[in-house]
Image (tube, rainbow, N blue to C red):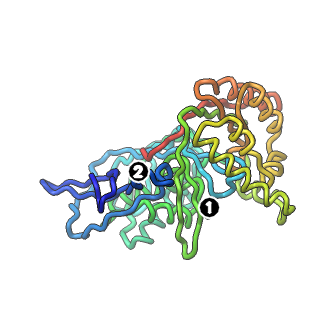
């Protein structure tokens, strides 16, 4: 299909009888342009609200939201990557009274608060109020593989799930742009919520008036990812508290240089660019002090063949990047070192999640 002479990829379609309405389009650059491999948030087709079919989704249904790593060294507070640890929310039934009744909570969701401080509920309620739609009641069952306070986007996933729950019965179509901007407003930084909502590798830059610009560079299929975490938790507030109020000029200059190498390495699977590009001077050296055994565990991953290894988000999870299919040894080596210091640790090899589930 082509629009104004440009090829397009249809991401979503609504069908009512013989009428098919395209509701979200990726407009792809003409072949031969320099930006053909860099996608940004999709352009949105304009549709009259009166043309859309009015119907509530059939229940039960399941919402799946991925975990996410963030920063990857120099991409501080704006780079995110969706990973295959999942939060699954099964929407069982509607209720008359506003609020959530939890039928079942398994995995790390057992540790979630049940009341109004629950992030999924807060995100759902906030999204409803922002769109001037009624706050409804739901019966939910949730299962999460995402560890809490470990730098893997557990908060971002819960917020994304709440926004997607609110979108189920929205009176009008919610664009991806609207959802990621609400995610930024609710969490305060865009890296995890944007990756959880869009999938893939995301560079999310806040602009004026709450706007968010997102670029999604391609990711080489040759790369693999390994994780390891212990029982040590590093809340975001604590991770930010250890950061200095000012850094030397030479450190501020070095980080964007490294980011350029990192992005090229991630796009092309270039081991040297990934290794040199992941170096950071703004946050990693300070946050490593909060992770017992962290520095030694990162060195163990490199010794087992990882191209690079660093802190995932604010920690305490560690992430290694290397050749796909050869990352289990890196995960095990990091976990073994963390286990030696902390008593317990978990190793996981994960895949990037390249599109929303």
Residue pictured at 53% horizontal, 59% vertical: 214
Image mark for residue 181: none
Q: Position of residue 75 (x, y in %)?
A: 67, 53
In which quarter of the view is residue 107 placed? Answer: top right
Mark 1 vs mark 2, foreground winner is 2
What residue would you read off at disc 1? 189
Pick the front one: 174 or 98: 174
Pick the front one: 68 or 40: 40
Q: Position of residue 324 (x, y in %)?
A: 59, 28
Residue pictured at 83% horizontal, 49% vertical: 285
Relative horizontal placement of residue 22, taking residue 147 as reference (left or right): left
**SS of the residue under disc 2:** loop
Relative horizontal placement of residue 175, taking residue 207 as reference (left or right): left
Q: Position of residue 196 (x, y in %)?
A: 51, 50
Image mark for residue 31: 2
Separation (CA) of disc 1 from disc 2 = 34 Å
């Amino acid at each position: 299909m082509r629009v104004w002479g440009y090829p397009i990829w249809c991401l979503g379609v609504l069908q009512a009888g013989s009428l098919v309405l395209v509701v979200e389009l990726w407009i792809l650059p003409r072949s031969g342009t320099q930006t053909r491999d860099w996608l940004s948030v999709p352009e949105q087709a304009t549709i009259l609200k009166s043309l859309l079919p009015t119907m509530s989704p059939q229940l039960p249904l399941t919402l799946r939201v991925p975990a996410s790593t963030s920063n990857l060294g120099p991409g501080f507070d704006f780079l995110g990557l969706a990973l295959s640890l999942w939060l699954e929310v099964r929407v069982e039934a509607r209720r008359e009274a506003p609020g959530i009744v939890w039928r079942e909570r398994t995995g790390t969701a057992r540790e979630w608060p049940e009341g109004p401080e629950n992030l999924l509920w807060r995100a759902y309620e906030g999204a409803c109020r922002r769109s001037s739609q009624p706050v409804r009641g739901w019966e939910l069952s949730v299962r999460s593989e995402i560890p809490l306070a470990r730098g893997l986007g557990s908060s971002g996933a819960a917020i994304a799930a709440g926004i997607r729950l609110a979108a189920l019965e929205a009176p009008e179509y919610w664009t991806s742009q609207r959802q990621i901007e609400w995610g930024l407003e609710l969490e305060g930084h865009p890296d995890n919520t944007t990756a959880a909502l869009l999938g893939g590798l995301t560079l999310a830059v806040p602009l004026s008036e709450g706007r968010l610009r997102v670029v999604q560079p391609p990711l080489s299929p040759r790369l693999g990812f390994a994780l390891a975490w212990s029982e040590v938790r590093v809340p975001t507030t604590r991770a930010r508290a250890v950061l200095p109020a000012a850094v030397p000029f030479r450190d501020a200059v070095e980080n964007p240089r490294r980011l350029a190498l990192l992005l090229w390495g991630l796009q092309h699977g270039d081991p040297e660019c990934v290794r040199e590009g992941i170096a950071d001077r703004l946050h990693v050296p300070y946050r490593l002090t909060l992770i017992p055994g962290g520095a030694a565990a990162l060195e163990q991953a490199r010794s087992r063949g990882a191209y690079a290894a660093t802190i995932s988000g604010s920690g305490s999870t560690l992430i290694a990047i290397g050749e796909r299919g050869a990352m289990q040894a890196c995960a095990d080596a990091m976990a073994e070192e963390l286990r030696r210091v902390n008593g317990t640790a978990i190793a996981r090899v994960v895949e990037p999640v390249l599109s929303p589930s």
